[in-house]
Image: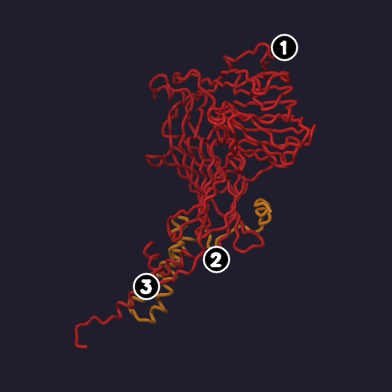
Chain colours: A red, B orange
């Protein structure tokens, strides 16, 4: 192929082509602030309800807070504080007006201060400044990754696993809070240890109701902002604590083939309790046969889009035959790819693998109206496994490989009335570069999006990409090959027409 | 206009390739076979007129045939 391409270039038969802009867009930004920064006290939180969900292998928090502007000027910057050790583990932060969620999410930007600071901030920009004495109800949702610690850290192979979560009974706030309450939703009623507070409220604290523990309500109008009261809960979680250290996801668009190829490469780790003794194959076989709950990963289920075909599952050794694929049906029935890793993944164990599949491009690509040669692509941002214990991603790299010659690439994520699990666009690092593979002369345009700290909440998120792609861009491959072979014919004719006989001239 | 609105507006125009996935092998094989025949005919008489009559069709058939054949075997370019 390269020979053909080189020949074509030499012949000058390759028509002038558009240049793919390989420009880099560093869209992830952080605001730098002085080290002794404290947010201006222009707001007051009248009522704060924090819902902490611990049913999965990571923490998902939703905070509903009624905010009042106590300043004499309109204000639009609201500061969200996080402890420095938690700040880097926050994922999928989203802030909305609870009363009108359809208006979309507010801009939230991370603020960078000195690393020695105990508290770091996100600054939330209200779309409209909040007038003095006016109120707004915010819904703040985010995940906290890698904040659950197994206790005990080592267990026997068939033992129950317990996780401990430490947090503050007083929600951390940059502003005074009049009233607040924290509700913890635990995965089971087996909670051997939890902190009982004293002096924060009258009566028992926390209050238990099944697997829901409620700390508060507290009247904290006289408590200084930033005051913390550490509490710990330890609860049973005999499931794997799945963490993908890295997920690389490639989505490749082929106009000639009418195909959308997806490949995902996972570097998985179980963050649960490690094994106390050596692994026993016999004990594992017995517990699997009897279906006992286990802290090891047995199986992963990937729901795939309707019409997905040609799945594969490989790891460092090669093809892994312990998988099952149930194809879906267009338009509504999802396919299902069920994978069993080569070995059970216990706490502290790693497993890396890759899976891939194909789809018809017609379900994901449309030709934009009103402009010739503009296409619009809509694909899931991430897919990934759907397990009851959930999965957290420390880093996700999504690479959308567009056809060779695609230009004027624009992208956005769909931002509906409910959370899509993604952070704001300013937290997504985007880059445009070239990707050279089979039959390419210039290289394909690849849009690379990098996000840190995602959870399986982002499974519902979708990515939209528009690009320009002309007829000549499409014809570049066959024309290049045609030109190459034509050059060979011309060369053959030319060499054949040379008179190399030995005779008198 | 957001991209989502562009997507919704284009609902009546899904992308469809010229040759469907099921026909790629047939088209690719036929074109490559035609390229082989034309190349053979050119080899019998390597004159300037043969370039026009056999070389150009063979080149075109090979160019498009190679693209469809590589798609047919699962490498979607």
Structural crowding at the residue carrying mark 3, measured as other residues with C-alpha within 10 Å and reported as few (<14), some (14–19) or many (≥20) = many
Q: Circle 1 is placed at which residue position?
A: A202
Q: Residue at x 56, y 40 (%)?
A: A303
Residue A335 image offset from top left, x and y in percent: 56, 43
Residue A277 image offset from top left, x and y in percent: 39, 19
Mark 3 or 2: the one toward you: 2
Q: Which mark is residue A471?
A: 2
> In the rendered structure, the residue with mark 2 lies on which chain?
A
Residue A247 drawn above or below residue A366: above
> In the rendered structure, the residue with mark 3 lies on which chain?
B
The residue furthest right is A133
Q: CA distance from mark 3 to mark 1?
A: 94 Å
Find residue A88 and report its image quarter.
top right
Find residue A138 and report its image quarter.
top right
Q: Which mark is residue B39?
A: 3
Circles 3 and 1 on the same chain: no
Q: Which mark is residue A395?
A: none
Structural crowding at the residue carrying mark 2, measured as other residues with C-alpha within 10 Å and reported as few (<14), some (14–19) or many (≥20) = few
Residue A284 drawn above or below residue A380: above
Q: Residue at x 65, y 52 (%)?
A: B3
Q: Mark 2 or mark 1: which comes first in sequence?
A: 1
Circles 3 and 2 on the same chain: no
Residue A459 drawn above or below residue A271: below
Q: CA distance from mark 2 to mark 1?
A: 75 Å
Q: Residue at x 66, y 21 (%)?
A: A170
Residue A498 image offset from top left, x and y in percent: 28, 80
Instruction: Determine the secondary structure under disc 3.
Output: helix
Side (left or right) of B41 relative to A411: left
């Amino acid at each position: 192929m390269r020979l053909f391409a080189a020949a074509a270039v030499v012949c000058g038969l390759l028509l002038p082509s558009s240049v793919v802009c390989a420009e880099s867009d560093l869209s992830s930004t952080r605001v730098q602030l002085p080290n002794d920064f404290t947010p201006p006290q222009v707001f007051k939180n009248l009522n704060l309800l924090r819902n902490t969900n611990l049913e999965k292998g990571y923490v998902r928090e939703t905070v509903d807070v009624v905010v009042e502007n106590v300043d004499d000027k309109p204000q639009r910057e609201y500061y969200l504080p996080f402890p420095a050790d938690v700040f880097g583990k926050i994922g999928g932060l989203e802030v909305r007006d609870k009363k009108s969620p359809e208006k979309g999410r507010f801009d939230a930007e991370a603020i960078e201060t000195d690393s020695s600071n105990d508290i770091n901030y996100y600054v939330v920009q209200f779309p409209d400044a909040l007038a003095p004495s006016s109120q707004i109800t915010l819904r703040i949702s985010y995940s906290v990754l890698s904040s659950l610690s197994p206790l005990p850290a080592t267990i026997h192979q068939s033992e129950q696993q317990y996780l401990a979560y430490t947090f503050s009974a007083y929600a951390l706030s940059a502003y005074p809070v009049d009233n607040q309450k924290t509700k913890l939703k635990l995965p089971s009623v087996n909670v051997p240890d939890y902190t009982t507070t004293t002096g924060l409220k009258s009566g028992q604290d926390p209050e238990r109701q099944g697997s829901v523990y409620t700390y508060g309500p507290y009247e904290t109008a006289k408590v200084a902002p930033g005051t913390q009261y550490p509490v710990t809960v330890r609860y049973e979680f005999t499931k794997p604590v799945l963490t993908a250290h890295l997920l690389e996801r490639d989505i490749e668009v082929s106009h000639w083939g009418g195909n959308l190829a997806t490949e995902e490469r996972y570097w998985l780790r179980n963050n649960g309790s490690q094994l106390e003794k050596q692994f026993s194959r016999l004990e594992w076989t017995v517990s699997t046969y009897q279906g006992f709950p286990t802290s090891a990963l047995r199986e992963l289920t990937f729901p795939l889009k309707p019409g997905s075909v040609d799945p594969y599952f490989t790891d460092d050794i090669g093809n892994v035959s312990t998988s099952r694929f149930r194809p879906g049906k267009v338009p509504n029935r999802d396919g299902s790819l069920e994978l069993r890793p080569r070995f059970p993944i216990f706490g502290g164990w790693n497993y890396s693998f890759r899976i891939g599949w194909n789809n018809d491009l017609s379900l994901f690509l449309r030709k934009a109206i009103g402009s010739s040669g503009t296409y619009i692509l809509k694909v899931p941002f991430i897919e990934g496994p759907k397990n009851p214990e959930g999965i957290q991603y420390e880093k996700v790299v999504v690479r959308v490989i567009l056809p060779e010659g695609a230009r004027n690439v624009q992208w956005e994520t769909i931002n509906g009335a409910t959370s899509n699990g993604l952070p704001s666009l300013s937290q997504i690092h985007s880059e445009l570069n070239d990707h050279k593979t089979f039959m390419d002369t210039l290289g394909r345009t690849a849009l690379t999006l990098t996000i840190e700290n995602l959870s399986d909440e982002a499974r519902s998120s979708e990515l939209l990409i528009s690009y320009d792609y002309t007829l000549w861009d499409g014809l570049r491959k066959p024309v290049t090959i045609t030109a190459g072979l034509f050059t060979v014919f011309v060369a053959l004719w030319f060499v054949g027409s040379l008179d190399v006989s030995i005779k008198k001239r | 206009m957001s991209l989502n609105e562009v997507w919704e507006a284009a609902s009546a125009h899904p992308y469809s390739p010229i040759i469907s996935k099921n026909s790629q092998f047939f088209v690719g094989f036929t074109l490559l076979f035609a390229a082989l025949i034309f190349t053979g005919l050119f080899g019998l008489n390597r004159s300037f007129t043969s370039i026009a009559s056999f070389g150009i069709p063979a080149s075109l058939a090979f160019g498009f045939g190679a693209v469809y054949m590589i798609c047919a075997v699962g490498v979607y370019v």
